[in-house]
Image (tube, grey):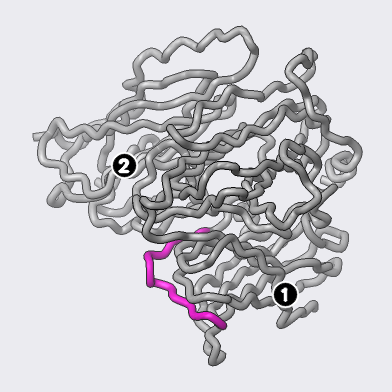
Amino acid sequence: MLLTLLLLTACESEIVDSSYIVPDDVIDLRAVYPDPPEGGLQILTPDLAIPPFSEALWCFYDTWDGPDMGITSFVELHPSQFHHHSLVKDANSLESVSDGEFSACSDIEETGGMQIAPLVHIVNLTVPRGDGSIINLPDNVAFRLESGQKYSADIHYINTTDQTVLINSAFNLGLTPTENIDSWVSSFDLDAGAFALPVGEESTISFDCELEADVSIVTLLAHAHQYGTNYKIEHISADGNSEVIIDIEWVEDYRWNSPTLFFGAGEISMREGDKIRTTCTWDNTSGEVLSFPSEMCTTSGVALGLSGPLFCTGEAVDLEAR
Amino acid sequence: MIKALTVVPLLLACNPTTPKEDTGDGLLRLASITGNVELAVPPSGDGLGTMVVILSNNSNSVDIMPHRIFVESLVVIETADFAMPFQLTNIFPQDEPYYIGAFFDEDFSMAGQGSYQPNSGDLSSWMDGELFHEIVLGSGEDRSLVITLIDEME
């Protein structure tokens, strides 16, 4: 474990052009991906070479220059091997990046890419179609893709082998004209922000994010890593009442498979001024101080009623170590 | 009427796979699975329930969300030759196996749970103590598959 961590910091990934001659000792996982649905959008990253024993968190930036549309399906296309995450994020706030730029996310987003919200998160409100789309919504409900939306395709791979890994990633978005949509959903990420978990101690961080609109939650997702021991999500109403939505004992496997709940419209309603409180507890047995991105405390989800993707670095209400 | 429980060679009804596409560019092509879910035994209730096919990158051993799922809700099973077609697409080829399983949730008890563990009255692709079974998919492969459900609770 320690050896791997040390090696992971030693190499830099490289963009590979189409004339690249693939050596025999390279694991080539590049693929030709199918077209998106008719009228849809495919976001295809350039090829990327990930050196042995290294980690690559790269971002590909572009702008949607079509008309306002609704996103009705979203298929991540990538190898499963070595893959950690693939997200398309709202990059409107990143003024320094230009279309077509493909670079290490940390060059631009100082904390490794957690300061902006994904355009979509998983939703299963209807029957999945078997194509791998992570959003399954009624026909008249969609995520919004506005004309001029700048986005970042964040891809994260960890190469644990002694060979270079070649990959490319894509996202196929199904789109529909806005006149077909009656209700809009938006994603949110509620993040603990910077923290440092002391060595050999149990630590708890609790933070709030206030809602700026009336919403109905349709997805809630809890994300932490392997040193987490408990994860709680509460709805704190403006009058101070608390309703626990998720309170689970955390297990290491959840790092790769975040516990996710889906709710029908109106099942969990929150009012403007209410807060979502997230409380994470860890037992830091790693032997070193833990901070982002080695550990995380991020509540993600999807809601009806938000005006667009929401990212919140929470207001800490409790920090305890013992 | 469908015969009572028999030992069913689950997932062995695969047709020969489509030959791998030789594109000459060295790039991989995504795979797919097309098939039917059939029954070896009749449902114990009124035949109304949810049919689910799951493809996962792991064994689902901790009741986690699957990689890819196909659900046909409100299936009504009325005849012995019932078959539900399904298709799973956009699957990245890999040497490591995927895990595939299916079940008929007779009482909708699994709705919204995300755990996909059958209980009494459900039919499932259970064999040799496993609900999920390994399947390896090559580049560009379109695998044909028949999944037969049994009542492992008997």
The crowd level at tag 1 (other Cα within 10 Å; few <14, some 14-19, many 20+) is some
Residue shown at 28%/37% (left/top)?
B149
Farthest residue toward the left?
B1
Residue shown at 63%/32% (left/top)?
A44
* Mark sitting on residue A162: none
Q: Judge whether residue A144 is colored magenta.
A: no
Q: Quadrant of the N terminus of chain A?
A: top right
* Mark sitting on residue A205: 1
Mark 2 = which residue? B124
Residue A2 vs residue A221: left or right? Answer: right
Q: Judge whether residue A268 is colored magenta.
A: yes
The residue lying toward the viewer, choosing from B48 and A113, is A113
Type of the residue with mark 2: Ser
Query: Where residue B113 sits in the image (x, y, percent)?
Result: 41, 59
Quarter residue A43 falls in = top right
Query: Where residue A192 sits in the image (x, y, percent)?
Result: 72, 68
Query: Is label 2 in a helix, a strand or a loop?
Result: strand
Query: Is label 1 in a helix, a strand or a loop?
Result: strand
Q: Quadrant of the C terminus of chain A?
A: bottom right
